Image (spheres, helix red, strand yellow):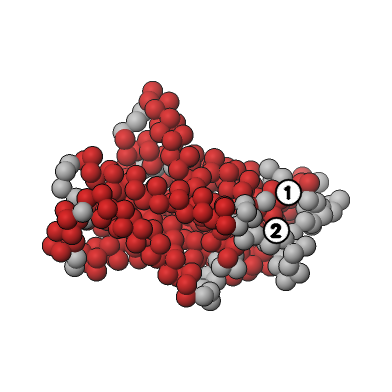
Amino acid sequence: MTASADIQQPVHRGPRLRRVVALHPVATFLLLMFSVNIAVSQVPVLTRRDILPFDLALYESLGPILGVALPAFVVVAAARGREGVRELARRCLRWRVSLRWYLFAFLSVPALVLLCVGVVFGRALLVVLANRWTDVFTTVLPQLVLLSLCFIVAEEIGFTGFLQARWQDRFGPLKASLLVTIPFAAYHLPVVMVDFGFRLAQLHLALAFLGVLAVLQLFGRVVIMWLYNVTGSSVLLVGLWHASFDATTSAFGRTFAVPGGIRNAELAGFWMPSAVVVVLAVLVVVLTRGRLAFRTEATSGRRQPPFPAQKVSVEGSSQLTAKERAL
């Protein structure tokens, strides 16, 4: 009797675990995400900034890959099987979009920031660009490629391809952008703790900083939601736009630092790019009347939600109802 029970136990454990994940996909994703990201940030060698180029740390890459993209695929595989994994992968690799969206993804933020910096600093910026224009090809573009391949696209697989897309189908685009800002900001807590050298005693300072950052990130999530919708659910294009923003902040904060000390570097490298994103988000909301180009099944019979409502069988081997899909 004991031997028979020992043989049967592994058979039922897998489906039971899969059913728990399928019933609570968002909670499972968030648990895996925070656990992995906190774990990798605690390994000293992974926080060193002298291994990767551009002062990047290994944990900043392992976090998005192992702590965001991988959990998204694991949860989708448990909830929807191979079909769900293939569908998420198709959205992550969707590159056949109009050329204008590639131009927007790569150039919208740097071009507008360049314009703003030029207006504020005038001739000083022209002198810097004339002396260091080759750094665009030796520093900025390589950094953009590295960020896209090893950092940001993986990050957006979980936050846009899985979480924000799921919440958009349930709550609408604006509310989804607001909701995803909370875990997205909290996801940056290990980075803030490591970069600022905060201990647990300074946790309140880190949370206060994240609160300010979350307000700015909310506008970014709005632009991302809109870009995701207008490109036919392309996570790739969303990741490229996000990477372009990060490369721009580094470029104007370091590569093309305008003379004048840390104050000018912060103005050109953080506040101006953030202001550009705020303006873009406001324009998107106004011009789309808050819909962010989202088309429901009622307005477009061709569009299918990435996470359709499903039912759970009595045995627990099947699928979810719409009510059980909620967080």
Q: Position of residue 90 (x, y in %)?
A: 59, 70
Q: If the image is split into quadrants, where does the C terminus sit?
A: top right
Report, in whole angstroms, how far the alpha carbon at label 2 lies from the one at label 1.
Answer: 9 Å
Up-down: is 267 above or below 147?
A: above
**Residue 109 visible from this viewpoint:** yes
Write the residue at 49% across / 61% down: 238
In contact (CB < 8 Å): disc 2 and disc 1: yes
Considering only order in the chain, which callout, 1 or 2, is on the residue closer to the N terminus?
2
Q: Nearer the viewer, residue 313 or 247?
A: 247
Report the residue marked by disc 1: 325
Q: Nearer the viewer, residue 71 or 245?
A: 245
**Amino acid type of the residue that numbered disc 1 sits on in the rendered structure:** Arg
Write the residue at 27% across / 53% down: 119
Q: Is residue 274 left or right of residue 2?
A: left
Q: Is residue 6 left or right of residue 74?
A: right
**Amino acid type of the residue that numbered disc 2 sits on in the rendered structure:** Phe
Q: Nearer the viewer, residue 1 or 265?
A: 265
Mark 2 element type: loop
Write the residue at 40% across / 62% down: 108
Report the residue marked by disc 2: 307
How busy is the neighbourhood of tag 2: few (under 14 within 10 Å), some, or many (20 plus)? many
Write the residue at 16% across / 53% down: 124
Q: Position of residue 247 (x, y in %)?
A: 33, 57
